[in-house]
Image (cartoon, rainbow, N blue to C red):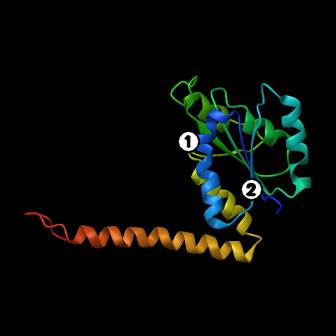
Amino acid sequence: MTPKVSIIMGSTSDLKIMEEAAKFFDEMEIPYEINALSAHRVPELVMDFAKNAHKRGIKVVIAGAGGAAHLPGVIAALTPLPVIGIPIKSSNSIDGWDSILSILQMPAGIPVATMALDGARNGAILAAQIMATGDEALMGKVLEFKATLAKKIEKANAELAQVKTKFKTN
């Protein structure tokens, strides 16, 4: 099975956050790979990965990083693939803001789709939506997933309708 998505993170301390993306890909039956790469510790490996990911069949890269969080931007500078950045609130983070701004404030020509702090699941959903534009079967799975979100709200409203209080009008 050839991976379509590459999930990468600055270190394995980010795994707890990034495995949420992996869980979504398992649910959607999308093949992925998951690796630790550090823009600061192994820049040569990051460069090789970024330049060659598309040649291996990867369609989207999801890159999570904390602190200075350079990994998503470095990948985006070196690959033709869409890169989704996941800022991670790490042990050396300034409440996550350093990670958010490092990924969000990319220069013109080097886009990184930036998710919310620790938002790996949304990153995976966006990756699936990107890939679904050229894959009818995957589009069906994405549509089904979106429908389940709507059903959760319908169920919640049905439960709320049963709540009775003195001044509640619905």
Q: Position of residue 48 (x, y in %)?
A: 90, 39
Q: In terms of sequence position, does the residue under pointer 1 or pointer 2 come before the other?
A: 2
For the residue carrying disc 1, how many other residues have a C-alpha within 10 Å: few (<14), some (14-19), or many (20+)?
A: many
Q: Label 1 to label 2, Cα distance in Å?
A: 19 Å
Where disc 2 sits, the SS reads strand
Asked whether residue 107 is in view, the answer is: no
Residue at x 59% of width, y 28% of height: 98
Q: Which residue is mark 2?
A: 32
Above or below residue 100? Residue 60 is below
Q: Quadrant of the N terminus?
A: bottom right
Residue at x 89% of width, y 31% of height: 44
Q: Which residue is mark 1?
A: 118
Q: Position of residue 169 (x, y in %)?
A: 15, 69
Quick check: 76 left or right of 156? right
Above or below residue 134? Residue 71 is above
Of residue 36 and residue 148, the one placed in the foreground of this image is 36
Q: Position of residue 89 (x, y in %)?
A: 55, 33
Amino acid type at circle 2 is: Tyr
Residue 39, numbered label: none
Q: Position of residue 55 (x, y in %)?
A: 92, 54
